[in-house]
Amino acid sequence: MAIRHHREVTPAIERVADIRNGAPVIAGTGIRVSDVIHYKRLYDADGKDWIAETIRAVPQVTREQLEAAITYYQVNTTEIDSYLAKERSIDEEMQSRQSST
């Protein structure tokens, strides 16, 4: 059963308890809003058209879906930044473990 939040802000974003641990995702895709923000930051830093580059990397998403994810992020910045911080922490821990072996 889908648990939907913030439908009035971005109908294209949903939460499904058994998909991505209930993190907000682009409806029907499993692509997390935090993934979209990661792509945006990555491609913006390189001076590239982040939407075009993200669609190349993840062809099952549309420009409209990416824009909906950005809108969701703008309203829920603290929540999504928390997901990104947790991912960074896990990545750093894994790198630390790999370098110590």
Image (spheres, grey):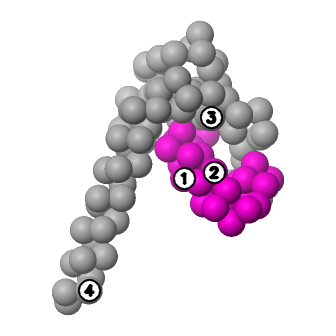
| Tag 4: amino acid | Ser
* Location of mark 1 (residue): 38
Q: CA distance from mark 2 to mark 3?
A: 9 Å
Q: Residues within 10 Å of mark 2 (few under 14, many from 20)?
A: many
* Location of mark 3 (residue): 70
**Residue depicted at x 26% and y 86%:** 99
Q: Which residues are magenta?
A: 29-54
| Tag 3: amino acid | Ile
Question: Mark number for residue 40?
Answer: 2
Along the viewing direction, whichever of 36 and 78 lies nearer the viewer: 78
Residue 79 shown left or right of residue 54 in the figure: left
Q: CA distance from mark 2 to mark 4?
A: 29 Å
Question: For numbered disc 1, what is the local secondary structure?
Answer: helix
| Tag 2: amino acid | Lys
Question: For numbered disc 3, what is the local secondary structure?
Answer: helix
Mark 2–mark 1 CB contact (< 8 Å): yes
